[in-house]
Image (cartoon, helix red, strand yellow):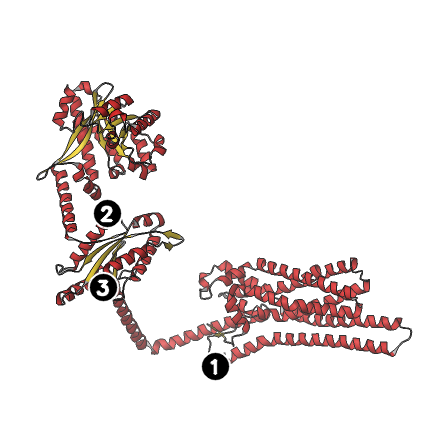
Amino acid sequence: MNIDPEPVSFLDKLFRKTGRFYPIIILLVLQILSTPLLVILSIIPAHENAQFNSFQLEKLILIEIIGLSFRNLLMLILFYLFNQSVFRRLAIPTEMKNEDIHPDLEKKAWKQATTASRNIILFEFLGLIILVLIPILLYGSKWLYLRFDQMLYLSLSVFAAAIAILLLESMSIDQFFEPILMAVLPDQFNDQISGIKGIPIWLKLTVSLLGLVFICLLLVIPVSYNQAKEIYLDSTKSFALLSETLRILIKAGIGGIVVGGFLSISIASEFTLPFRKMIRLFKKLENGDLSQRIGVSLPDEFGKLNIYINDMINHLQILNSTLEQKVADRTAELQQMNALLEIELNERRKAEEQLSYSALHDPLTNLPNRALFSDRLNHTLERSRRRNNYSYAVFFMDLDRFKVVNDNLGHDTGDLLLIETAQRINSCIRSEDTVARLGGDEFVILLEESDDPGYYVKVAERILHKMAFPALLDDHKVFVSVSLGIVLGSDNYTKAEDILRDADIAMYQAKKRGRGRYEIFNPSMLDHVISQLQLETAMRTALENGQFVVYYQPIIQLGKNKIVGFEALLRWNHPTKGLLLPADFISIAEETGLIVPIGYWVIQEACRQLRDWITQNPHNSNLSVNVNLSPKQFSDQELIEKITTIIDDYQLKTSHLKLGITETLIIENRETVSMTLTRLREIGVHVEIDDFGTGYSSLGYLNMLPVDTLKIDRSFIHQIKENNSGIEIVQTILALARSLGMNVIAEGVETNTQLESLKTLGCDYVQGFLFYEALEPQEAVKLIQV
């Protein structure tokens, strides 16, 4: 459906530029134009009749301008408050379809738009009387000492001016509001008809005719009365007075004729413009163009007529389309089939192109994906084999702590970060270089043929510098660094996979060495990775084949000089390397997650061994075994259930098992740790903080955690020298533990000086090489039997 096109008017251009501010601007312009006109039309005729002195005239003009200004401001405020639906509707982009707009908003906006002109005229007229005329009369009577006849002349002049402005605005304001009506016009016929609430035509005509009469009367009658009075009071009956009277009457009559003529022209334009639009539309309909519609520009009977005409054309168009369709269906089947075939071929071609593009590009960043990057890298390898000294480099890049962004700000923000990263990388390389996204937060870069030997390092530094700036993503400022692994081209490479593997290895080396940096690959890195993989495989085999063993280091109660328990320490009886300590393999177990099953095996083995010792030595039934938990094992949701099951399986008391956690684990996740510790205490398992004093930050909430024992880290024990030097930290930890009702174990006691100092300080328990090393089970049981 097309609205009958007309030359683009100034009002249409203004509406397109100002949008939802257009109504306020129009109302403001009308007020700016009408205010001086009101002053002129009211004050000048009144002055002619009332003969104000200069002081009265100046004050009256000033008071009228102030009153009109206040009325205008109040009108702007009321107009905005009573027509908010119109402003909200005009704020919606014009390209937005009407079906996407809420129906209630569409109806309210249409109703308010059609009643806006009527309300403006009514409120302006009432405002002029209440806010301008009445204050002027009160002020003139009290402070300007106006006579009754002067106030009467002034009132009649103001009424005449008000009626004149009312008629002018009633004839013209709808034309100013035409762009608004066209913008908020609903799609539905019923909504259009029911929403027409403007001033009816009969009322406009009636008001216009009566207004013309009243204007003439209000302009002529006061003048006639005043001059008749002057003639009556003039005893000389001078010819000059009669001439002046005739001149004033003619002047007033001419004023009335001018105002009436101008209003008549406005009335004629008001009522002929809709007919001209309809005639132009009918001419186009006569030529068979049923797509044209007439614009609903007036909120009155003309507007309703336009709506009915448009609805009638809609029905005619539907009927015409139905008839044409029936004829076209019979004659255009082959054309439709050809068109369908052509469309299908085009769609298939586009789908193939899209599939081809999608198969080689990342949908999020539009960068090449692994397949396309590998293809380009293979071509680079072929060129390097054909040409001597062909230089190239491959970067493997990973965002540091990207998971933190995803987990805390959401995956949408994470996607925005990946897009921002792709753009920053592209800005750091040449157009002939290639950057691709492999998946997740991993990117790879292929740089080729640089005359500058240091170009590749410069690019890496440029990327690190570029990524150091914060990214603004959905009102979040995100700081993120990257780790880069670099492989420089070499004749040793024949496969793209090998290059990517080595670049990945170098990238992980950069992460291990602090993140936010780059590392250039060297063969020793690959050897280390292979060694780690072999160690991981061997660990899995060791767990399956029972190669892990548990050693036990006694814990001595100083007061009784008695063994009260053992700390279970893991060892690996490697088939080729011999007995390995945890430092040789525990970090790999943490990385791979093997630490969890290994940890449960240690608990199970320690409980089994303790059960056997107690069974064989009932007099030592109060022995306990201490087992350290890894952070991953402590985070296991089934930890409590599994520990309870192990204790029950070996018919032990929960007090027989003591679990150790690191101070760092408490600091990183205090709330979760506190909940788990509370559940362990509820089932009766004691908990100790291992290596206490190395975490620096747990003192602030130590009293809030359900912890039973502190183990002083061996580094503090080793600081104790002769003459009690280096004893201060140990003394402080012991005092803290006593105040909180906790036991203390000093680990790593190796000299008599350390032992005597600990006794002096009143330490509860000790363990270390001064007493016993970690022992095999068959050696440890001998100590119990003593």
Q: Position of residue 559 (x, y in %)?
A: 25, 19
Q: In the rendered structure, which amino acid carries the disc numbered 1?
A: Asn
> Which of the pair 645/306 is nearer the observer?
645
Q: Which residue is mark 3?
A: 452
Q: Tell me if 77 is positioned left or right of 459 in this view.
A: right
Q: Quadrant of residue 745?
A: top left
At mark 1, the secondary structure is: loop
Q: In the rendered structure, which amino acid carries the disc numbered 2?
A: Lys
In the rendered view, tell whether residue 408 sits above or below residue 706.
Answer: below
Whether residue 126 is visible, yes or no, is no
Q: Quadrant of residue 705?
A: top left
Neighbour tally class for label 1: few under 14, some 14-19, many 20 plus, Cα within 10 Å: few
Q: Quadrant of residue 727?
A: top left
Q: As drawn, which residue projects farthest toward the right?
A: 235
> Which of the pair 10/159 is nearer the observer?
10
Q: Which residue is mark 2?
A: 512
Q: Position of residue 371 (x, y in %)?
A: 21, 61
Total marks shown come to: 3
The residue sitting at 50% across, 61% down in the picture is: 89
Q: Which residue is mark 1?
A: 287
Of the two numbered discs 2 and 3 in the rendering, the one whose residue sits closer to the viewer: 3
The disc, 2 or 3, on the residue closer to the chain's N-terminal end is 3
Whether residue 224 is visible, yes or no, is yes
Q: In the rendered structure, which amino acid carries the disc numbered 3?
A: Asp
Q: Position of residue 616 (x, y in %)?
A: 14, 21
The disc, 1 or 3, on the residue closer to the chain's N-terminal end is 1
Distance from label 1 to label 3 (Cα)? 74 Å
Q: As drawn, which residue projects farthest toward the left?
A: 576
Distance from label 2 to label 3 (Cα)? 29 Å
Q: Are marks 2 and 3 in contact (CB under 8 Å)?
A: no
The disc, 2 or 1, on the residue closer to the chain's N-terminal end is 1
